Amino acid sequence: MNTDKKIVFNHFYQLRHDIKRSHILAPSFVDKKYASLVQPRWMSRIHPVYAMIFSFLSEPVSIPDLTKELSYFLEMPEEDVEALIKPFINNNEIAVTNYKGTVNYFPRNIVIEEGQLFGNSVHYTPQQFAYKEIDLTQERYYVAPASILFMVNNHCYTDCVYCYANKSVKATPLSFDKIKDIILQAKKWGVAVFTIVGGEVFLYKNWKELFDFLIENGYKESLVSTKVPLSEEDIITFEPYGIPIQISLDALDPEALKQILHVKSDYGEKIKQTISNIDKHGIDFQVATVLTKYNETIDNLKSLHDFLGQFKHLRRWEIRVGFKSLYSRGDFDRIKLSKERINDINQWVEEVKKTTSVNILWSMDTGEKYFKTEEGSRKFIGSRCSANYSNMVILPDGKVTICEQLYWNPRFIIGDVSKQSIEEVWNSSRALELAFPKREHFRDESVCKKCAIFDECLSFPNKCYADVLKGYGDKNWDYPDPRCVKAPQFINELQAV
């Protein structure tokens, strides 16, 4: 690399100190033209010395000048400094380093050339990352979460048979001024991602002002999901935000939609018009289809495929099997798909993928991940759970839970941001009890109580409490995650059988 060129910290990423370590965090949204340069939603712990090094790159600097400054600051020879910073300069792949016995992970292009910089710069100083002890082993964030999910309401436009929402609580919503205060707190504590969901975001009266305030403070949604038929005027209002939309569409047949969503006969046409207008105004969108007994036919999937295939701005069609919800209407066994039907759909999807221009994401989850893992939660199959480890969920009234599926279940409420700060909630006694469970908190009925790897398993927070409650009931909240080989068979089936 030409040493006359100036290099700079890639300010898409955020540096944040966390008492005994530092973090590199990244937002969830990035403009398409920069997508190849960064890794959205990145989170990693690093030795604070690396954050100090990057602070010298807050503004563009030449490599010789940087080397001299760091040599003086770190009290190291210049050749050693050059070796230390070399892995980060235009690194096209994830970088892994070892510093004083600590393994550190860095996203691609953590340091870039001056001309590649986009977005606003942040001025960091080495003093911001001062430390007395080092701890890169504790998984949970010390001071505040890395991400927050805020549920603006629990109102819905539809009434789905597979409903995943708890609409039974009629909570008094937070004022918009209080919501703005929470966003400012999140910014202060270096929360990298602030996501808004519903209910229905477009049924929240201040949705436009909320998007404006979030963007003003450095938060931009990566996706907004809705089942609401939007007017063209709403779509024109939304267009300048440049945020992709996910539209839920389970069928085109009006009778099927009535059975699935309990909507009026014209709902399907309104949603089709919404999709046409979204595409017309150049907004990227994706479509989600949830399959139950009411829309499991290949003919239904064919009609959806033919309809969606005409749109230029469709980025993905996600087809997934409906799973048991804590709040499903009626008996889940009545609406769930059989394994045979799932296999038929899988065969159709695989055939269609060979010729279609539609990007189909099909999740053939038949529950085969359950009852398999012997080594504890670190090895569980599937995505890692962020609940109470790096993420918290704020409900419409300000109550804070660890998972959006758990809603107002009192066992998992860790605080209330209408009365407490984000930091106070994150470090509340209940949050810490759930994050660092003790054997004495478990009943004798739970196999976790006497498990030989209790500490090793639960020190890596990855237990899906939602699945535990779905499979075993609320009273058995302390049962193991059903992915564990020692988990008992379900009392209530979660998936196809």
Image (spheres, grey):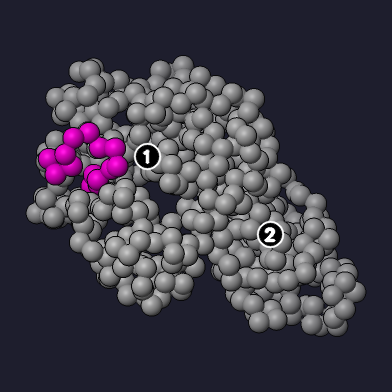
Of residues 57 and 115, which is closer to you in this image? 57
Mark 1, Cα crowd under 10 Å, few <14 / some 14-19 / many 20+, is many
Query: Relative to 172, does residue 81 appear above or below in the rendering?
Result: below
Q: What stretch is highlighted in magenta?
A: 321-334
Q: What element carries label 1?
A: strand
Marking on residue 126: none
Answer whether residue 202 is visible to the viewer in this image: no
The residue to which callout 2 is attached is: 18
Residue at point 34% right, 28% down? 168
Answer whether residue 328 is visible to the viewer in this image: yes
Residue at point 34% right, 23% down? 157
Residue 395: image x %, image y %?
Answer: 49, 35
The amino acid beneath tag 2 is: Asp
Which is nearer the N-term, disc 2 or disc 1?
2
Residue at point 29% right, 62% down? 445
Tell me if 1 is positioned left or right of 360 in this view: right
The residue to which callout 1 is attached is: 286
Outermost residue, left direction? 340
Q: Quadrant of the N terminus?
A: bottom right
Q: How many labels does the image show?
A: 2
Residue 303: image x %, image y %?
Answer: 18, 35
Query: Relative to 93, does residue 497 appear above or below in the rendering?
Result: above
Residue 284: image x %, image y %?
Answer: 44, 37
Of residues 44 and 360, which is closer to you in this image? 44
Of residues 173 and 195, which is closer to you in this image? 173
Mostly what secondary structure, the magenta segment? loop
Of discs 2 and 1, which sits in the foreground?
Answer: 2
Mark 2, Cα crowd under 10 Å, few <14 / some 14-19 / many 20+, is many
Residue at point 46% right, 16% down? 233
